[in-house]
């Protein structure tokens, strides 16, 4: 079992309704024309809407359980013929195709904690881009005042009904910052209240190695990519110190 498989059952509850970034990726897909490569694609939240727009999309993820859900959703959406799903580590994948656009959405790139891993993955992505192809990275902009608040306290995130199982799912989280190493060590706790009243807990730990603005260009350069722009939002607003996002656009 892959360490990210544990998230697969809850991934759509956490992220499935997020649509704020989809127009961004649609616009860049129109600009480049495809084909599109999505790294750390999860259960297909981004790649399926792109396939519905007519693009041929390859999704790479390390989790077989995530990919199984993505395959099922692509079939239900009628786009399985335009979707290729590949189980691989994004530091090591090798495909027989070049892409006009590569995407790493919603902080997924930060699961690569070390600088070496980030450079290795970017190098792999660069190898799979056409000459002039674009990479879009979506990562959060670290807020130092907020990071100091990550002290490991247990926080109630939300309570939702899982439409697949009918169970109520209570999500708790605990996050501790390690500023010296630029790492957030987090654990999600999913407490499912089963229809008979029993509570079943799933524990999902993970780490995020966050980045600051000045690091991004150096990492891209080491990987053979050229930073074109960094935006502060999905609407491509100028990046400022208080921007919530760093939307990085790089070209091969």
Image (tube, helix red, strand yellow):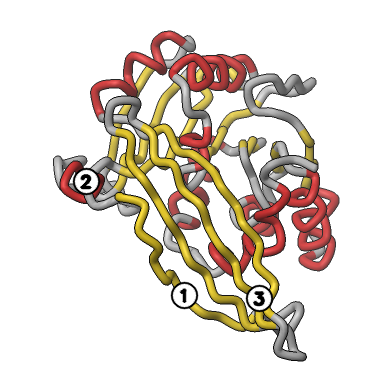
Element on which disc 2 rests: loop
Image coords of residue 1 (percent x, y): 80, 43
In the image, residue 162 above or below residue 229: below
Element on which disc 1 rests: strand
Which of the numbered marks, if any, corresponds to residue 148? 2
Residue 163 found in image quarter: bottom right
* Residue in the image at 59% along x and 29% along y: 100
Image coords of residue 63 (percent x, y): 73, 43
Cα–Cα gap, marks 2 and 3: 30 Å
Cα–Cα gap, marks 1 and 2: 22 Å
Residue 160 found in image quarter: bottom right
Residue 58: tell me if it is visible: no
- Identify residue for label 3: 192
Which of the numbered marks, if any, corresponds to residue 241? none
In front: label 1 or label 2: 2
Cα–Cα gap, marks 1 and 3: 12 Å
**Mark 2 vs mark 3: which is more N-terminal?**
2
Which of the numbered marks, if any, corresponds to residue 158? 1
In the image, residue 200 above or below residue 246: below
Residue 34 found in image quarter: top right
Residue 218: tell me if it is visible: yes
Cβ–Cβ below 8 Å for labels 1 and 2? no
Cβ–Cβ below 8 Å for labels 1 and 3? no
| Residue 92 or residue 170, whichever sits in front | 170
């Amino acid at each position: 079992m892959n360490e990210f498989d544990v998230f697969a059952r809850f991934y759509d509850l956490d992220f499935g309704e997020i649509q704020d970034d989809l127009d961004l990726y649609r616009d860049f897909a129109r600009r480049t024309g495809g084909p599109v490569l999505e790294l750390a694609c999860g259960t297909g939240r981004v790649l399926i809407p792109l396939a519905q727009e007519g693009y041929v999309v390859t999704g790479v993820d390390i989790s077989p359980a995530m990919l199984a859900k993505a395959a099922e959703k692509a079939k239900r959406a009628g786009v399985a013929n335009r979707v290729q799903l590949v189980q691989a580590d994004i530091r090591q994948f090798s495909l027989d195709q070049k892409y006009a656009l590569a995407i790493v959405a919603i902080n997924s790139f930060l699961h690569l904690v070390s600088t070496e891993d980030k450079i290795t993955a970017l190098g792999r992505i660069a190898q799979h881009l056409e000459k002039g192809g674009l990479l879009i990275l979506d990562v959060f902009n670290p807020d130092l005042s907020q990071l100091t608040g990550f002290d490991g306290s247990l926080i109630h995130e939300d309570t939702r009904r899982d439409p697949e199982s009918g169970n109520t799912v209570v999500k708790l989280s605990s996050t501790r910052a390690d500023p010296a190493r630029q790492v957030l060590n987090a654990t999600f706790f999913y407490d499912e209240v089963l229809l008979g009243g029993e509570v079943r807990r799933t524990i999902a730990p993970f780490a995020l190695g966050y980045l600051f603005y000045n690091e991004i260009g150096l990492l891209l350069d080491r990987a053979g990519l050229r930073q074109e722009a960094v935006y502060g939002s999905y609407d491509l607003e100028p990046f400022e110190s208080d921007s919530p996002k760093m939307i990085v656009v790089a070209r091969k």
